[in-house]
């Protein structure tokens, strides 16, 4: 028990160190990218006096170290600061955008994980029987080679042709209308899950093939267990770990913001917010959104690490001895 | 189980076909709710700070400027009903009577004075009204503007002077960063950032019978194809599109109409005559490039058949120069271009052009590709570099570029864009435009010449010099393409829009008959 707590502590320490490193890198990168907030805000008609006035107005005339430290201190207290553009609290925007992104990410995961797992197991089992290998590879290749934005554009166009009103302007807050919200998220979530489904399927298939080589599988077949029994008792248990890992990482990635899908389907998510902020050099917003994405990713990885040890005690034991 | 599943699927499909789809339309115009599929939510709502088109489009629903362009782009009355120039540097304006803010308080000349104080206090956009020294109230409906130097087009420039409630601003009860309170046709309502914004009719609006819609819902849809889909499916009544093929795409749908609105905006090619490393410092080389460009191909290929040739003074404006004077505008001359390059002793020329779609030059990369092909015909190789907006501003501001392609808005005066070619006028351009004293003198003279035949002549001289030096090459105009549901709404558009306020007559939009 003590060793598990120590392991969890080391995972948490790594996560905090990663987040700090990300914050420094993003802050420096943003401030060294050509063209400051004031130039983009005032556009081509600005002049030096107006630039200086605006920098002073929003506090960009302070030394970089001071700006960074005050920002980190704010984050530590749960305050993301204000947008330079709107002068409104970033947290206010997050209260709208995080639910939208979370809903999209969860729906995409709800589609990709079961379908991907089923396809992967099916392909793996078919491969064991010497059947259907080509079909599985074709499905995997399609999933990997069709970009989600292409699929999304096709879906939007197709839906608009048949007058399906969930294309184009598709977002409804889940708090306003849960059923309508989910319905309007179907196309974006389907587009987003396409690639993830392929990854999950490939991982599941490879895991099934790896399990096939284990002696207990030979024993199970020799005992005359049915295929369904083999899948339920031996395969599912043993492929759970790689599936949890890949799914957790994928959810973390999606929570960072599915930028293009959010733009195509007019979903006011975190990714869309981040892109607009980068284009306008709204530094606090960029920092906040990047940190949010980094947190999601880091926590998802940490969760996968910890869950891996719990699902498969052999992995936990290996980690404790090699730590 | 299967029945339950089938029922759920049916319910979901029914929801998809019905939920939140209905746009506009009440039984009569008075009950009309318009739905606007807009590209993006404006960054800010403060007219004293925000200067981008998306902000202006929202301001124009709530605020009104002092003057507004007539259909022929001469300056006409707005909140100011009339004006007269009392000396070279003094003007007197008469406000329209009976105008009220949406809180019911009458507009007075003190509000104009207060607005100018606010512009000066914020200090970000007061340079849009250069030479204005003081604004003082004469009586409740008259005010005087005193200039530091003559500015014959002052009334034109006031087409973007948004009038705020000066009294409330002074009292601190109106914060333009958070509040929208104007004399315009609509009143701001619930706003979900990045999702939607609702406006209702201003019951105090001074134009009787307007607005014809009782409310307006703005839905923010960034992606162009998705905006088109929203209009097709009836989720939006109208939208702007950047897709040049939109007429072909929508050809089979009689409910959706495409309207091309001319503007005073133009795409330009800037060739750097100053930078020591610029490969385009020789005037003959720049002239050769100008002559090799095929404007018709730009219009047909990159702009889907929209756009017209123009001089540096946008063609729709009074006093504008003849577009035919621009080198190569009425037809490319490859032989002459080659001859000029030969005279300059240039062969195998290769240079870099930067394009920044970030500021709305959405077709910039496509135009650059056409030019790239055109220049290959005279043995010139052009590398296209598509840049982020910030990087572009830095490079152009530093003057460290060979060539760049972008667009400018023309506003309502011929002096606006050509004025940018005076290095002291626009710092961004100062290191990338000619410092030739003759052409600068001609530009300054044209801008300061009062209305009359002399003004057009002065602009013609300045244009001729700019054309000859070929450092700023106007390519074609940049029209706006609008799609709308003709079965739902009957829109009103000005034929040529000078200040990017495509829907400036939104108050007159009515239900389709």
Image: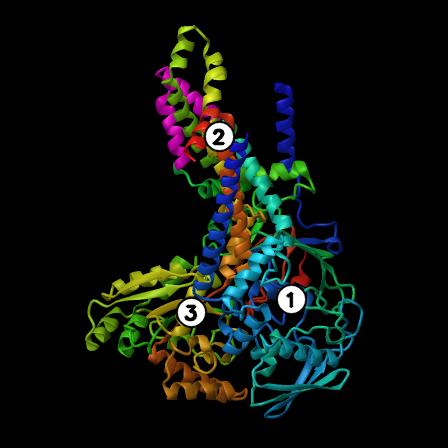
On the picture, is B46 further left or further right than A41? right
Query: In x, y percent, where is residue B194?
Result: 61, 53
Residue at 53% in and 56% down: A287
Residue B370's place in the image compared with A15, above or below, is: below
Whether residue B211 sits left or right of residue B17 in the image: it is right
Of the 4 image quadrants, the one containing the C terminus of chain A is top left
Report the disc number at residue B60: 1
B346 in relation to B14, above or below: below
In magenta stretch: residue A130: yes
The chain letter for the residue carrying disc 2 is: A
Label 2: few (<14), some (14–19) or many (≥20) C-alpha neighbours in 10 Å: many
Q: Earlier in the sequence, mark 1 or mark 3?
A: 1
Discs 1, 3: same chain: yes
Q: Residue furthest bottom?
A: B87
Q: Magenta stretch?
A: A117-144
Residue drawn at (63%, 79%) of the image: B120
User: Marks 1/3: CA distance?
Assistant: 31 Å
> Which mark's residue is nearer the viewer, 3 or 2?
2
Q: How many discs appear?
A: 3
User: What's the magenta bit mostly, secondary-structure-wise?
Assistant: helix
Task: Describe the element under mark 2 as helix, strand or loop.
Answer: helix
Q: Indicate the secondary structure of the residue bearing disc 3.
A: helix
For the point 53% across and 49% down, the residue is A271
Task: Return the chain for callout 1.
Answer: B
Residue on which disc 3 sits: B394
- For the N terminus of chain A, which image quadrant? top right
Occupied quadrant, residue A137 = top left
Q: Where is residue A243 drawn, in percent x and y?
A: 47, 29
- Tell me residue B100's x, y (percent): 77, 71
**Is residue B73 visible in the rendered structure shown here?**
yes
Q: Which residue is mark 2?
A: A308
Q: Secondary structure at mark 1?
A: helix
């Amino acid at each position: 028990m003590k060793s598990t707590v120590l392991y969890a502590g080391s995972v948490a320490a790594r996560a905090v160190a990663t987040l700090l490193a990300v914050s420094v890198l993003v802050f420096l990168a943003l401030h060294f990218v050509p063209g400051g907030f004031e130039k983009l805000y005032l556009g081509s008609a600005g002049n030096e006096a107006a630039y200086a006035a605006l920098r002073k107005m929003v506090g960009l005339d302070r030394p970089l170290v001071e700006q960074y430290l005050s920002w980190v201190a704010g984050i530590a207290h749960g305050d993301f600061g204000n947008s330079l553009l709107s002068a409104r609290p970033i947290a206010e925007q997050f209260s709208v955008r995080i639910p939208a992104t979370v809903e999209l990410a969860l729906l995409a995961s709800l589609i990709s994980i079961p379908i991907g797992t089923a396809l992967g197991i099916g392909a793996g089992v078919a491969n064991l029987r010497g059947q259907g290998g080509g079909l599985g590879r074709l499905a995997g290749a399609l999933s990997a080679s069709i970009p989600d934005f292409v699929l999304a554009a096709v879906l939007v166009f197709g839906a608009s042709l048949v007058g399906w009103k969930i294309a184009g302007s598709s977002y409804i807050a889940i708090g306003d209308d849960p059923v309508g919200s989910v319905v309007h998220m179907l196309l974006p979530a389907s587009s987003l899950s396409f690639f993830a489904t392929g990854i999950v399927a490939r991982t599941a298939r490879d895991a099934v093939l790896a399990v096939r080589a284990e002696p207990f599988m030979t024993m199970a077949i020799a005992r005359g267990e049915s295929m369904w029994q083999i899948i339920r008792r031996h395969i599912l248990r043993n492929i759970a770990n790689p599936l949890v890992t890949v799914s957790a990482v994928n959810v973390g990635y999606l929570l960072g913001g599915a930028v293009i899908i959010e733009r195509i389907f007019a979903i006011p998510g975190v990714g869309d917010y981040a892109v607009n902020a980068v284009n306008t050099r709204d530094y606090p917003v960029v920092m906040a959104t990047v940190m949010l994405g980094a947190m999601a990713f880091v926590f998802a990885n940490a969760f996968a690490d910890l869950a891996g040890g719990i699902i498969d005690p052999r992995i936990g034991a290996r980690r404790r001895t090699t730590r | 189980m299967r029945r339950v599943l089938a029922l759920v699927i049916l319910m979901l499909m029914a929801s998809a076909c019905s939920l939140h789809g209905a746009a506009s339309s009440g039984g009569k115009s008075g009950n009309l709710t318009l739905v606007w599929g807009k590209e993006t939510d404006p960054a800010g709502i403060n007219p004293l700070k925000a200067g981008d088109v998306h902000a202006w489009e929202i301001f124009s629903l709530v605020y009104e400027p002092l003057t507004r362009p007539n259909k022929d782009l001469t300056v006409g009355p707005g909140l100011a009903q009339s004006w007269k120039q009392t000396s070279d540097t003094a003007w007197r304006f008469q406000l329209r009577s009976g105008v009220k803010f949406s809180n019911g308080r009458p507009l007075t000349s003190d509000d104009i004075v207060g607005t100018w104080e606010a512009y000066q206090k914020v200090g970000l956009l007061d340079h849009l009204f250069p030479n204005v020294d003081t604004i003082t109230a004469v009586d409740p409906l008259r005010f005087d503007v005193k200039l530091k130097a003559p500015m014959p087009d002052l009334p034109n420039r006031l087409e973007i002077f948004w009038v705020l409630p000066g009294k409330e601003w002074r009292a601190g009860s109106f914060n333009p960063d958070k509040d929208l309170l104007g004399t315009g046709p609509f009143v701001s309502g619930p706003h979900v950032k990045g999702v939607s914004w609702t406006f209702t009719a201003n019951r105090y609006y001074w134009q009787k019978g307007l607005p014809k819609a009782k409310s307006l819902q703005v839905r923010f849809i960034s992606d162009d194809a998705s905006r088109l889909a929203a209009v097709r499916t009836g989720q939006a009544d109208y939208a702007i599109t950047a897709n040049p093929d939109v007429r072909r795409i929508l050809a089979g749908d009689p409910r959706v109409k495409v309207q091309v609105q001319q503007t005073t905006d133009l795409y330009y090619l800037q060739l750097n005559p100053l930078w020591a490393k610029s490969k385009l410092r020789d005037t003959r080389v720049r002239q050769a490039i100008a002559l090799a460009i095929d404007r018709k191909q730009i219009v047909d290929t990159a702009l889907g058949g929209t756009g017209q040739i123009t001089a540096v003074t946008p063609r729709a404006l009074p006093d504008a120069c003849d577009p035919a004077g621009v080198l190569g505008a009425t037809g490319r001359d490859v032989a002459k271009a080659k001859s000029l390059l030969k005279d300059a002793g240039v062969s195998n020329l290769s240079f870099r052009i930067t394009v920044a779609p970030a500021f709305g030059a959405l077709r910039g990369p496509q135009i650059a590709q056409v030019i790239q092909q055109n220049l290959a015909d005279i043995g010139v190789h052009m590398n296209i570099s598509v840049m982020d907006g910030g990087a572009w501003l830095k490079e152009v501001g530093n003057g460290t570029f060979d060539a760049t392609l972008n667009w400018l808005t023309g506003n309502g005066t011929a002096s606006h864009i050509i004025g940018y070619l005076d290095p002291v006028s626009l710092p961004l351009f100062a290191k990338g435009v000619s410092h030739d004293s003759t052409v600068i003198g001609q530009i300054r003279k044209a801008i300061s010449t009062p209305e009359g035949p002399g003004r057009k002549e002065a602009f013609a001289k300045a244009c001729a010099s700019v054309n000859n030096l070929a450092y700023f090459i106007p390519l074609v105009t940049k029209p706006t393409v609008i799609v709308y549901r003709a079965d739902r709404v009957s829109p009103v558009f000005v034929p040529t829009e000078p200040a990017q306020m495509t829907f400036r007559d939104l108050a007159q939009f009515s239900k389709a008959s």
